[in-house]
Amino acid sequence: MHSSSVLDRRAGAGPGSTARDLLVLWQHPVSREIVPIGRFSRSGSTYSFRYTRGAADVPDFRPLPGLDDLDRRYDSDRIPAVFAQRVMDPERPDYVDYLHTIGLTPELATPWEQITHSGGRRAGDTLQFMEVPSVVDGRARARFLTSGIRHVPDAAHRVAGDSVCVTADEHELALTQLVPGDTLQVNAESDNPEDPSACMVMAGDVPLGWVPRALSADVRTLMRPQPLTVSVVRIGEPGTPSHVRLVLDLDVVAPDGFRFDPEVRWEALAA
């Protein structure tokens, strides 16, 4: 998918970048747990990768290809090859169409931006990327891709104590009516077999998708003192791959003492 011509030093620093630190998430092949295994960062034209305590906690975890040492910090002016596979070659005929689906234009589509905007997912892959959330000036902030959109229609979901079910047409209509800046509710979903802390994103009484599992427990904590809302950053057109269709921002007052990742599984092993 990638071309070495787009992975040089110049491609590392393009305009429009805001994210500088991504959490690398890995799905365990047996338990299906989403594990935070690494931190992938960019500073100027230098990329860095470090494994996290989450990776160290997985029995018999096998390091990523080319990144063999859990206790080493990897610095380079090129994206590690295992991540570069998630960058589309600009010579491909569908390159511009692909950029459109993830909210980029060719002049902004550095390798870093492609991974940030797409979540770095590939079909049949176990890796994905998420901007590391933060608590700044007493506010909890996170930007994320809404999960599981295609699994919402025609299934019963118990949200905020009520059973809700929408058809594919009702779900699609709710999505197509969204515009950037719209406010959506976040409610707890009970009895979710995949995630005991599941949080559903709602447009009125229509469920749209889920907060990513890597954030759900922390979002549940943020819900306790206040109703929780998020705002639409980007909504893709019909036909956009579901995993990149709806991008949301969380920006709420953080309770005293709140921090994301209280179990410090996101903490890097290397200095």
Image: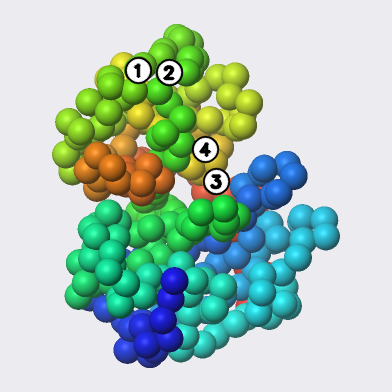
**Residue 214's disc number:** 3
- Kind of residue at badge 4: Ser
Among numbered discs 1 and 2, the one appearing first in the sequence: 2
Q: Which residue is mark 2?
A: 154
Q: Residue at x 32, y 32 (%)?
A: 229
**Residue 167's disc number:** 1
Q: Work out how far the residue at label 3 is from the one at label 1, CA to CA, in angstroms.
A: 27 Å
- Kind of residue at badge 1: Thr
Among numbered discs 4 and 2, the one appearing first in the sequence: 2
Is 121 positioned to the left or the right of 103 in the image?
right
Which of the two residues, 236 or 48, is positioned nearer the viewer here? 236
Q: Which residue is mark 4?
A: 216
Q: Work out how far the residue at label 1 is from the one at label 2, CA to CA, in angstroms.
A: 5 Å
Closer to the eye: label 4 or 1: 1
How many neighbours does mark 2 have within 10 angstroms: few (below 14), some (14-19), or many (20 or more)?
A: some
**Residue 212's disc number:** none
Looking at the image, which residue sits at the far right? 60
Closer to the eye: label 4 or 2: 2
Residue 119's place in the image compared with 67, above or below, is above
